[in-house]
Image (cartoon, rainbow, N blue to C red):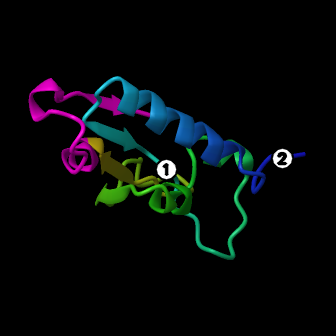
Amino acid sequence: MTARGQGVGRALLDAAIEFATARNVGTLEAYPVVVEPSAEINPDSAFTGTLPMFERAGFHVVADRASDPSSAHTRVVVRRDIRTEKASDVDTPVRSRTSRSLSI
């Protein structure tokens, strides 16, 4: 039995984004697996999440390969710059923000 497709990963990702935002983290970075839309993947291989889940959450690919070239599934490096999102928030003074990163 697997929890894939039940929203568990997305709920955890949303909580990580909220956690990082509350602590003035500037950038989030993750290493999801690339999965073709119709491809099946063993849940053991997708423990870091899948690329589409991170893309839907506003992350962007910054490196095409974060894994060993001989591995069965490619992992990429994705980032989301929370600092930029906060910059548009007029209620948050610029001087109160810090530049920190968090890998998830």
Q: Which residues are magenta?
A: 83-104
Instruction: Work out whether residue 75 or residue 99 is closer to the camera in this orientation and state it.
Output: 99
Would you place residue 34 above or below residue 67 in this image?
Answer: below
Q: Position of residue 78 (x, y in %)?
A: 36, 51
Q: Quadrant of residue 36?
A: bottom right
Would you place residue 24 above or below residue 50 in this image?
Answer: above
| Residue assigned mark 2 | 2
Q: Position of residue 87 (x, y in %)?
A: 19, 46
Query: Do labels 1 and 2 touch, CB within 8 Å?
Result: no
Residue at 45% x, 38% y is 17
Helix, strand or loop for disc 1: loop
| Residue assigned mark 1 | 32
Residue at 41% x, 57% y is 58
Q: Which amino acid is tagged 1?
A: Pro
Q: Is residue 52 left or right of residue 45?
A: left
Q: Quadrant of residue 99?
A: top left
Crowding around mark 1 (Cα neighbors within 10 Å: few <14, some 14 to 19, many 20+) is many
